Amino acid sequence: MSLLLAFVLLAEPAVADPVPPPVERCGYRVVQSYPHDSASFTQGLFWDGGHLYEATGQYGHSRIARLDLETGKALAETKLPDDQFGEGITRWGHQIIGVTWQNGVGHRWSIKDLKPLGDFAYDGEGWGVAMVGDRLVLSDGSSDLRFLDPATMKEQGRVTVRFGGRPLRMINELETIDGQIWANIWMTDLIVRIDPASGDVVSLVDLSGLKADAGARGSDSVLNGIAWDAKKKRLFVTGKYWPKLYEIALADCG
């Protein structure tokens, strides 16, 4: 699917801006690949303290785990209740905050040992989460991103993600890199880079071909999972049921 066709299909009908903001387009190059558990339905991913942290979905199989990068093996894990479908996770202080798909229940775990620290409730669906400054940003599959107080989970504001002036749906897993929100667009090979103040998509990253390289099969095995190692400036991506996780670098931007 071409970039243009993908966004035409996902964009909601709206009155476009007279002059939409310019959008940079980037490809990628693979720096290195690593093993990834092909049984993991990846929903959330982040890097912290030398390890990857991953949240997986599917009822009866949802968990959060600390992963060894070199082997892909779980060094520690905590399972979610069987009736909950795990979604995105992020770090806030000494906590990991995670959401579930349609349960309206979120969880807090200790990042030290992944032990539960408590639950919270929120409205609507949960897809991806990340920290933007001192606020937590939540995606729910719509074109809106909600900004929440991570201590109380009270909404503090929201922004509509727009591509070419039109709202863009299916915003999924989130990561914050250098002040921008990076987001997977569900069922595509695309990552968008979003200005959190305006909601405008300022850059597209086309990862076409990576799923095939990973040897992933099936319609559910889509790109999902973005992690940023801020200290070493490394960008990691993977997908649902992928047997590989990649460190990539952007290329051919323009």
Image (cartoon, rainbow, N blue to C red):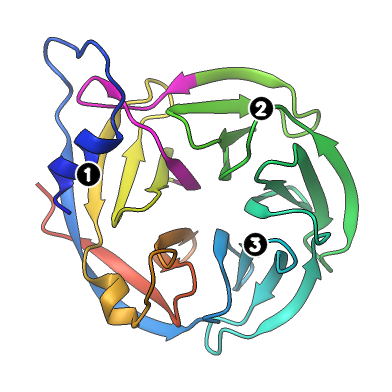
Q: Is residue 96 magenta?
A: no
Q: CA distance from mark 2 to mark 1?
A: 29 Å
Q: Residues within 10 Å of mark 3 (few under 14, many from 20)?
A: some
What type is the residue that disc 2 sits on? Leu
Does 246 appear above or below 215?
above
Q: Earlier in the sequence, mark 1 or mark 3?
A: 1
What residue is rendered at 46% in x and 20% in y?
159
Q: Is residue 173 magenta?
A: yes
Q: Which residue is mark 1?
A: 6
User: Percent x, y for residue 61?
Assistant: 71, 69
Q: Secondary structure at mark 2?
A: strand
User: Percent x, y for residue 145?
Assistant: 51, 29
Q: Earlier in the sequence, mark 2 or mark 3?
A: 3
What residue is rendered at 81% in x and 62% in y?
82
Q: Quadrant of residue 7?
A: top left
Please give left or right for residue 114 compared with residue 72 in the image. right
Does 95 appear above or below 123?
below
Q: Main secondary structure of the magenta part?
A: strand
User: Percent x, y for residue 42?
Assistant: 55, 64
- The magenta-colored residue range is 159-176
Q: Which residue is mark 2?
A: 148
What type is the residue that disc 3 sits on? Gln
Q: Residues within 10 Å of mark 1 (few under 14, many from 20)?
A: some
Q: Which residue is mark 3?
A: 58
Q: Is residue 178 visible?
A: no
Q: Earlier in the sequence, mark 2 or mark 1?
A: 1
Please state, as top left, top right, bottom left or bottom right, where the N terminus lies in the image: bottom left
Q: Residues within 10 Å of mark 2 (few under 14, many from 20)?
A: many
